Image (cartoon, helix red, strand yellow):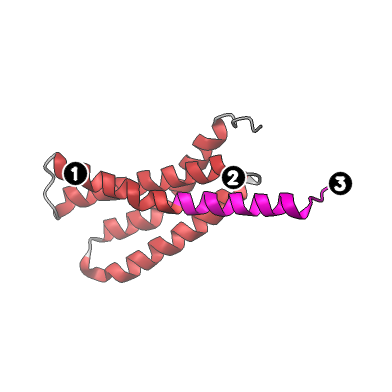
Amino acid sequence: MDTHRGRIGFKRGAVIALRSCVAFVLALAMVPLVNEAGGQLGDAIGLASGGDQRLSWDLAWVLIAGVAANWLVVKLAPCARRPHAVFLFVVMLAIHVQAVRMLGNDWPRWFSAGLLLCPPLQTWLGAAWALRQPRARQA
């Protein structure tokens, strides 16, 4: 084992890198799952597809999905929890910008603006929620 201050061994570094990757994969997988749950719930309560009411509902679930993903990536991060949240923010922002580009002018501007405002809010809420909770002790 490397005893130099600030240095870790190859094995420990590989475990940390793997855990970071798993945290990101699980967080990104959570987004469509939560969004789908919100869509199914919207259908179950009788929200008609299309229209401002349904778009508002769907935008709320986009926000909730991102908050859940940020919470998860911060909770699972083996170290450097805030940088994990920032990296997920960058990824989510890129996804949202691309979604707005693809939507074009066919969607209301408030919806596109909401999509672009989601990533900072998702990161702030999800990371704050996770950082407020104590970390589980590792064996």
Q: Residue at x 48, y 46 (%)?
A: 70
Which badge, 1 or 2, is on the more N-terminal residue?
A: 1
Q: Which residue is mark 3?
A: 5
- The reply to whether callout 3 and callout 1 are in contact (CB within 8 Å) is no
The amino acid sitting under disc 2 is Ala
- Measured as percent of width and height from the top left, residue 17 is found at 64, 54
Q: Which labelled disc corresponds to residue 17?
A: none
Which residue is at a point 31% across and 60% down the rendered structure image? 112
Residues 135 and 88: in front is: 135
The alpha-carbon separation of the residues under discs 2 and 3 comes to 22 Å
Image position, residue 10 (x, y; %): 76, 55
Mark 2 or mark 3: name the one nearer the start of the chain. Answer: 3
Circle 1 Cα neighbour tier, 10 Å, few/some/many (<14 / 14–19 / ≥20): some
* Residue carrying label 2: 77
- Asked if residue 32 is positioned above or below residue 104 in the image, the reply reads above
Instruction: Please give the range of residues in magenta.
Output: 1-27
Q: What's the amino acid at mark 3?
A: Arg
